[in-house]
Amino acid sequence: MLADLLGSKTTEKCLIYLAGQGEAYPLEIAKTFGISNTQVIRTLNKLEQSDILVGKEMGRLRMYSLNPSWMLAKELKAMLDKVLLNMPLAEQEKYFMKRKRPRKKNKVV
């Protein structure tokens, strides 16, 4: 959908995932969309060098999120939110409805 505008499908998927989740690490994005972790890392690094994303170290992980101080941040966020709203519900559930916190020990699933 946005791949022609953004330059690649990996860039599109990374930005959509970050808009939907708020922040993420590369392997999480790669596993969600079934793409190479190396591809995702290269894309996130390129976007961070362009100031579109910000990365911060959290232990051994590097967490990425949209840069709120980037000059077109509001416009980009609005565009990505519109893409998320128009995404089919099955696709939204597949990619964005994941449990973030651990389950209680010995809890029946």
Image: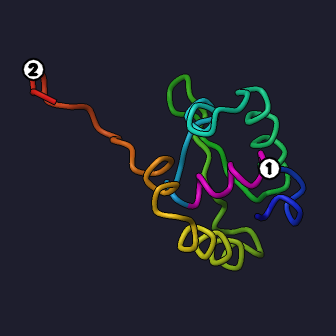
Q: Nearer the viewer, residue 35 or 48?
A: 35
> Looking at the image, which residue is at 74% across and 55% down?
12
Residue 45 quadrant: top right
- Left or right: 84 as drawn, with respect to 15: left
Q: Residue at x 64, y 32 (%)?
A: 34
Is residue 78 found left or right of 39 in the rendered image? left
As measured in the structure, the alpha-carbon distance from the residue carrying label 1 to the one carrying label 2 is 40 Å
Q: Which residue is mark 2?
A: 106
Magenta stretch, residue numbers? 9-19
Q: Which mark is residue 9?
A: 1
Q: Quadrant of the N terminus?
A: bottom right
For the point 65% across and 44% down, the residue is: 55
User: In front: mark 1 or mark 2?
Assistant: 1
Q: Are marks 1 and 2 in contact (CB under 8 Å)?
A: no
* Three-letter code for the amino acid on which mark 1 is drawn: Lys
The residue under label 2 is which amino acid type? Answer: Asn
Few, some or many C-alpha atoms within 10 Å of disc 1 (few <14, some 14-19, many ≥20)? some
- Note whether 54 is above or below 45 in the view shown: below
Task: Count residues near mark 2 (Cα–Cα under 10 Å), then give few for <14, some for 14-19, many for 20+.
Answer: few
**Residue 18 sits inside the magenta stretch:** yes
Q: Which image quarter: residue 37?
A: top right
Q: Main secondary structure of the magenta part?
A: helix
Asked which secondary structure carries label 1, the reply is: helix
Q: Identify the residue at horizontal 73%, vertical 27% (top origin).
A: 36
